[in-house]
Image (tube, rainbow, N blue to C red):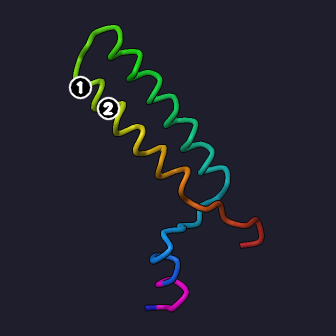
Amino acid sequence: MNAALERRIAQRSFLVSPTARNTGIVVTLGMLVFSSWMYLQTGDWVAMVFAVFSLGYGVFFFSITPRDRDS
């Protein structure tokens, strides 16, 4: 395997475009807000599970590194 790719995988800094990262963050925030609101309205445990997984997606999108415009 390529040494640079191995380092990137080891650092967990996956490169995506800034637009893709920002879109992921916005969509994740929307999913989190909606599922939390749904849980508060209904008390449904499935909505709470969905909110927790949405939070996990948010952590993922915040942790990835935006790619430079030149690459």
Contact flag, marks 2 and 1 (Cβ < 8 Å): yes
Check disc 1: other Cα within 10 Å, few if <14, some if 14-19, many if 20+.
Answer: few
| Residue sitting at x 40%, y 45% | 56
Disc on res. 46: 1
Q: Is residue 67 magenta?
A: no
User: Residue flagged by tag 2: what amino acid is it?
Assistant: Phe
Q: Is residue 5 magenta?
A: yes
Which residue does the numbered mark 2 point to in the structure image?
Answer: 50
Check disc 2: other Cα within 10 Å, few if <14, some if 14-19, many if 20+.
Answer: some
| Residue sitting at x 64%, y 58% | 17
| Residue ranking furthest to the left | 45
| Residue ranking furthest to the right | 70
* Quadrant position of residue 65: bottom right
Kindly report the distance in space between the C-alpha atoms of the residues bearing marks 2 and 1: 6 Å
* Quadrant position of residue 32: top left
Q: Position of residue 6 (x, y in %)?
A: 47, 84
| Residue sitting at x 58%, y 66% | 15
Q: Is residue 62 above or below residue 26?
A: below
Disc on res. 35: none
Q: Position of residue 21 (x, y in %)?
A: 60, 50
Q: Is residue 12 above or below residue 24?
A: below
Nearest the viewer among 59 and 15 is: 59
Under circle 2, the secondary element is: helix
User: Residue flagged by tag 1: what amino acid is it?
Assistant: Val
Query: Which region shows up in magenta?
Result: 2-6
Under circle 1, the secondary element is: helix
User: Magenta: predominant secondary structure element?
Assistant: helix
Q: Quadrant of the N terminus?
A: bottom left
Q: Position of residue 50 (x, y in %)?
A: 32, 32
